[in-house]
Each structure stands twice: as structure tokens, then as C-alpha cells.
Image (cartoon, coloured by chain):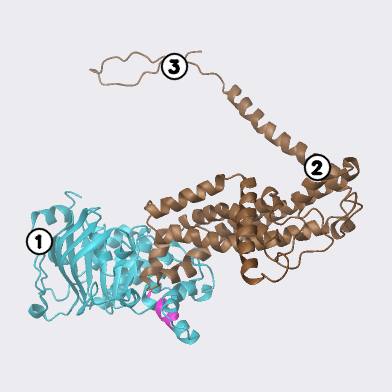
């Protein structure tokens, strides 16, 4: 059972094992539904083929910063309640792509997107006028942990409050629930009123995950969530992702190839704004169909 | 003394390099002395000014001096009306300048694209406003606020009152003129504070479904608060010391009553100093009072700046990574 494995992983990372030992010994979560093969550069949805529902459907997506085209004709299906990793060298467009999924790029002036991005059956660029509603369904965790300069409690409660939840009891319950889901409750239960900056870097990042979870999103976008953390904290984040995958659709950008291999079910390889290959993670890392992918995942370039 | 050439272990086929000759450049004592002298001159000047004022003024200051009005054509009595007028004036000015300044800064930083035409236009306006001599503000205040705005109000609402109601020098017009003068200070320091707020924090707020207004109110403004307060207090201490903008727009030579209405005239410390120094019939007799008044003005300004520093460091302490 993959779930059991995650539990053992977590226990082990708590015992201060050297991170190197861990990366060798940790069994990679088994790729479920390995028969589902989403293909790159094909726009047709594959859900009929597999029976796996697609949470996010991206079709013929082009993205521009001013006159610079950052994404070229991306078509990609992201399955529900699975972890999909986006890999590729710096500047390949994977973060830009991630940010189109909750329209975070809208905050950058001079950007433009073509094509469609659908969440379930909702076209998030045409059918949605209220971005708040979209962003409570599609949460996001950033590269640098970015808690607000507020108390731990207020950080997690922020999303609820801005979305109009006023009932103190409901807010308190949701905050506790989110902190428990991100395995932070035991560590911060007695410092809920302390400033979030007093937490360690790894705790801050898990707080950011808790903050995103508090509004009960369906999708969690993660932009290199562990790249600024030490190996132990990284391990905790990875274990957390392993737990969250049962309830959330997770899309994660990572530079760390082993991380993608360890935590994701599917992996998409981006290069220079193109989606080069998209497949089950095991296949991407063992027998990718393109030479370029193989070169990248084996470290021959990038 | 020339440094001795250094030889490194080299492969056999490496050609021998000519040893480099380095020129001695002195001990560095001269530039150090030069800069020390420059810094010393500043410290000395401040010491002399402060020392002179404190020595001359400390003997005059008493509770009576601070709490009673001038007497005998300003050769006796205290300066309470001037202190009261200054505080009232600066308070009114703050009420006008902080909201306008902060809103302008928010508009520039959060609502316009950096480098857009409108941003540049407003920025040019602010920079030029900051460069206008204060006497010009005074004349502008007289022409615009007193004559145009005040006179306009009078001709519309008070045409039958027999005399000017708003169309005369008054504390509200002086405060408005000072607000105009100190506006760049507030805008620039607020913008500075807004600029230091990391993009990630704003992104985090938007990513949780917050609107722009919610993000500004709940995340951006609280974090910019130290900068905004600094701007406000800098504006206050600048405004409290200005004489030129208020001498045509509301400050009075002498008033037997305290200003209680917005269209009253008022006495003010800086203007009081100017009056005593230039208009007094007996300069020697008013000299101790003059010293005392200057000392009070200085202490008031220091107190304000000190408060600003305290508030700022208290607020900063709440966010260790700032």
C-alpha cells in the first residue's frame, strides 16, 4: 500500500537520518494507473481511454510576456488526485505554465494567453469573472516560503477571512484542520498567536501549505516548494505531498530530478517553452520515448 | 620599499614571467584625516548651534513660560498661544497630507505600470513640487486657498455676512498650504515603503482569492505602516519649522485668543521667532524669550522625530525579516 509507505517515510525522516541515505532507500511511490498514458502535443483529451477523470485540461496554450512567447502550443491533461511534476531547465516555461492554471499571471502586466485551460468543465479564462472563486479552488504554494507578517493563526485564517468567512468557530476549526493536514499542528499548537516569522524555514513553508489548504482547494499548485529548504525540511515537504495526493490534485514544478521521481505519478518535461514529453513518471525516468528527455533526466544537459 | 617578487611552482614549459613592480601608495592617513575633518566640522557646527540655544534658552523655560501668553509687546510672558497654534496647525496639516499622500503612493505603486506615461507625469509633478521654494507656496496659498477657494466660498454662501468668513488668512488655509509643501515627503517615503514589500507576499494574498483592495488593506498597508508613519512624522517636523508658507495664509503677529475654529488666525512658533527677531521694538529685551522659543521649537521637533523612530522600530520588530 502506498499509503503505508508514506507513513514509514515520515517516521524515518523524523529520526534525523542523513538525507543521502534517505534518497537511496526511500522506495518511490508506485505509479498507480500506469496504463494511463497522457501524450504530449496531442490536444485530444484521453479520459475516455483511461477512465481517469482529468482535473485540468490545457489545450493549444500559447503564452506571451509582451512580444516574447514563453509557451508554445501546450496541450496537457492533468489527472485528478495525482501528483503531476513539471520538470525542465530554468526558463523553460514550467513556472509560467503552472501560473496559468490559477491565472496568477494576470497580475503581471503585459502578459497574454491563447488557448484554453479548463478546470473540470469550466473554462477558467472565459467562464470565470470572479478570480477569487477560482483561486479558492486552485491553491498555490510558492518557491520562497512567504507567510504574512502576522500570527500563525491569522496566516492560515487569511484565505477564509478574505473570502467572507466570519464565524469565529468555523475559522478556528478550519485553521486547526489545515494545520493538521500539513502535519504542523503538533509543532505550532501552542504558538498560534506567535508571529509566523518565528517558525523555522521548513515550518514556514508547511505553514504556507496549510494556509493554501485552509480554503479547501481541489488543486494545489506548487512552484519548487522545497528548493530553498534544507534536506530534512525537504523530506518533510515531500512526505506531506505524499499524504496530500490522496485528496488533492497536485501539480508541482521542481528542479530536483530525484524529487520528481520520488513524489510524482506523472511527469511533464518542458524545454524552451515547448512540452517535450509527458508520461507516467516511471516511464519518463526509465525509458522515455525521446532522446532529449533522456538526456535531461539523466543529467546530460540542463 | 618595493615588494619582493613572488615565484610560483610552474610546469617546466611555462615561460618565465617578468616580476611585477607595484608602486607604493602611502599609508592612507591623509584621506582619513580629510574625511575626519569634514565630519568634525559638521559635529562642531551642530554642537555650537545646540549649545548656544540650550545655554541661552534653558533659563527662560518654566511652566509659566510654556503656559502663559506674551505680555508687554512680547518683552515678557510666555509662548503658550504659539505652541497651541503650532500643534493645531500641524494636526490639521497631517489630516490633509497623510491620506492624500498615501493614496497617491498606492496609486503609483499598485495601480499603474511602472514607467507608464501617467506614472512619469505624476512623478515629475511630485519632484517639481518638492523643489518649489517655500515662499512660493506661501504666495500660492494666499492666491489659491485664501482668495480663490475662501473668497469663492464667501461669495457663494456668505455674501450677506458683511465681511470675509473664509476668504481671509486662517489656520485651515495655512494647514492646506503646508500640506501641499509636505506632500512629496509623504508620497516618497510611502512609495519607498510600498516598494520594499516583497512580490511573494502580494502573490500569496492573491493566490488565496483576495482582491486587490483586500490585499492592499490587509497585507500591503500594515507592512508599509512604519514607512507611512515615518513619512507622516517627517512631514510634521518639516511643516512645524516652516514660516514662509504660513505668513500670508493664516499666522498672526499677536492674538489675544486661541484659535478654536478652522477660519481663525493663529500664532505659531516659527513665525513668533521671526516676529520677535525682526519686528521687536527692543531686541535686547526679547532676546531671552527668543532663545526660549527657539529651544521649545527644537525640542518639539526632536520629540516628534524621536517618536517616529520609536514607533518605527516597534513596528519593525514585529517583522524580523524586514
Q: Which mark is residue B278?
A: 2
List x then y, in percent, for residue A139. 33, 72
Going from the N terminus, do you reach mark 3 or mark 2 first?
3
Chain of the residue on which disc 1 is drawn: A
List x then y, in percent, for residue A176. 44, 80
Q: Provide the secondary structure element on which disc 3 rests.
A: loop
Chain of the residue on which disc 3 is drawn: B
Q: Which residues are magenta?
A: A174-183
With A171 as the anchor, is A97 left or right in this view? left
Decide which of A277, A113 is in the foreground and name it: A113
A211, above or below B75, in the image: below
Report the residue marked by disc 1. A287
Q: Provide the secondary structure element on which disc 2 rests.
A: helix
- 10 Å crowding of disc 1: few (<14), some (14-19), many (20+): few
Q: Which colour is chain B painted?
A: brown
Q: Which mark is residue B298?
A: none
List x then y, in percent, for residue B282. 90, 42
User: Does the magenta portion include B71?
Assistant: no
B264, above or below B242, in the image: below
- 10 Å crowding of disc 3: few (<14), some (14-19), many (20+): few
- Residue at the (60%, 53%) spot, across then down: B182
With B61 as the anchor, is A69 left or right in this view? left
The answer to which image quadrant residue A162 occupies is bottom left
The answer to whether the residues at label 2 and label 1 have Cβ atoms under 8 Å apart is no
Instruction: Give the CA distance from mark 3 to mark 2.
Output: 64 Å
Decide which of A276, A57 is in the foreground and name it: A57
Report the residue marked by disc 3. B22
The answer to which image quadrant residue B95 occupies is bottom right
Q: Which colour is chain A painted?
A: cyan
List x then y, in percent, for residue B262. 70, 66
Is residue B200 visible to the viewer in this orientation of the structure? yes
Amino acid at each position: 500500500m502506498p499509503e503505508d509507505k508514506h507513513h514509514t517515510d515520515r517516521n524515518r525522516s523524523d529520526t534525523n537520518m542523513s538525507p543521502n541515505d534517505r534518497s537511496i532507500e526511500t522506495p518511490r511511490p508506485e505509479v498507480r494507473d500506469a496504463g494511463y498514458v497522457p501524450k504530449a502535443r496531442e490536444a485530444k483529451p484521453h479520459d475516455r481511454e483511461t477512465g481517469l477523470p482529468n482535473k485540468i485540461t490545457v489545450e493549444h496554450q500559447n503564452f506571451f510576456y509582451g512580444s516574447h512567447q514563453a509557451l508554445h502550443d501546450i496541450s496537457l491533461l492533468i489527472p485528478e488526485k495525482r501528483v503531476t511534476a513539471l520538470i525542465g531547465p530554468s526558463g523553460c516555461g514550467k513556472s509560467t505554465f503552472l501560473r496559468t492554471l490559477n491565472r496568477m499571471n494576470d497580475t503581471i502586466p503585459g502578459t497574454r494567453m491563447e488557448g484554453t485551460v479548463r478546470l473540470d468543465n469550466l473554462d477558467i479564462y472565459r467562464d470565470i469573472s470572479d478570480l477569487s472563486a477560482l483561486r479558492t479552488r486552485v491553491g498555490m504554494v510558492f518557491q520562497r516560503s512567504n507567510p504574512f507578517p502576522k500570527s500563525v493563526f491569522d496566516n492560515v485564517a487569511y484565505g477564509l477571512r478574505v473570502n467572507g468567512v466570519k464565524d469565529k468557530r468555523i475559522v478556528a476549526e478550519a485553521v486547526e484542520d489545515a494545520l493538521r493536514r500539513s502535519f504542523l499542528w503538533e509543532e505550532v499548537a501552542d504558538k498560534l498567536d506567535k508571529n509566523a516569522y518565528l517558525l523555522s524555514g521548513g515550518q514556514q513553508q508547511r505553514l504556507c501549505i496549510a494556509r493554501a489548504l485552509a480554503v479547501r482547494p481541489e488543486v494545489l499548485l506548487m512552484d519548487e516548494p522545497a528548493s530553498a529548504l534544507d534536506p530534512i525540511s525537504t523530506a518533510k515537504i515531500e512526505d506531506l505531498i505524499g499524504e496530500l495526493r490522496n485528496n488533492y490534485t497536485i501539480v508541482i514544478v521542481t528542479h530536483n530530478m530525484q524529487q520528481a521521481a520520488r513524489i510524482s505519478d506523472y511527469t511533464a518535461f518542458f524545454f524552451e517553452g515547448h512540452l517535450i514529453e509527458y508520461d507516467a513518471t516511471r516511464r519518463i525516468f526509465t525509458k522515455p520515448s525521446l532522446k532529449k528527455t533522456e538526456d535531461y533526466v539523466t543529467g546530460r544537459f540542463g | 620599499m618595493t615588494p619582493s617578487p613572488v615565484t610560483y611552482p610552474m610546469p617546466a614549459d611555462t615561460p618565465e614571467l617578468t616580476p611585477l613592480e607595484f608602486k607604493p601608495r602611502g599609508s592612507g592617513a591623509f584621506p582619513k584625516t580629510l574625511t575626519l575633518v569634514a565630519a568634525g566640522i559638521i559635529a562642531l557646527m551642530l554642537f555650537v548651534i545646540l549649545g548656544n540655544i540650550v545655554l541661552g534658552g534653558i533659563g527662560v523655560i518654566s511652566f509659566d513660560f510654556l503656559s502663559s501668553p506674551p505680555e508687554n509687546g512680547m518683552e515678557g510672558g510666555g509662548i503658550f498661544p504659539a505652541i497651541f497654534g503650532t500643534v493645531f496647525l500641524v494636526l490639521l496639516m497631517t489630516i490633509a497630507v497623510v491620506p492624500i499622500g498615501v493614496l497617491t503612493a498606492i496609486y503609483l505603486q499598485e495601480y499603474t505600470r511602472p514607467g507608464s506615461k501617467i506614472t512619469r507625469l505624476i512623478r515629475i509633478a511630485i519632484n517639481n513640487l518638492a523643489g518649489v521654494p517655500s515662499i512660493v507656496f506661501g504666495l500660492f496659498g494666499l492666491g489659491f486657498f485664501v482668495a480663490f477657494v475662501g473668497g469663492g466660498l464667501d461669495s457663494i454662501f456668505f455674501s450677506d455676512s458683511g465681511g470675509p468668513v473664509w476668504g481671509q488668512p486662517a489656520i485651515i488655509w495655512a494647514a492646506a498650504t503646508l500640506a501641499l509643501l509636505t506632500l512629496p515627503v509623504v508620497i516618497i517615503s510611502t512609495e519607498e515603503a510600498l516598494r520594499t514589500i516583497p512580490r511573494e507576499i502580494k502573490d500569496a494574498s492573491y493566490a488565496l482569492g483576495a482582491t486587490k483592495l483586500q490585499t492592499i488593506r490587509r497585507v500591503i498597508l500594515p507592512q508599509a505602516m512604519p514607512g507611512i508613519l515615518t513619512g507622516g512624522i517627517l512631514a510634521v517636523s518639516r511643516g512645524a519649522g516652516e514660516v514662509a508658507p504660513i505668513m500670508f495664509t493664516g499666522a498672526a503677529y499677536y492674538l489675544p485668543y486661541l484659535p478654536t475654529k478652522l477660519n481663525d488666525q493663529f500664532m505659531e512658533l516659527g513665525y513668533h521667532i521671526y516676529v520677535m527677531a525682526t519686528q521687536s521694538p527692543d531686541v535686547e529685551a526679547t532676546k531671552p524669550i527668543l532663545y526660549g522659543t527657539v529651544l521649545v521649537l527644537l525640542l518639539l521637533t526632536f520629540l516628534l522625530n524621536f517618536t517616529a523612530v520609536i514607533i518605527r522600530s516597534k513596528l519593525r520588530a514585529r517583522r524580523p525579516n524586514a
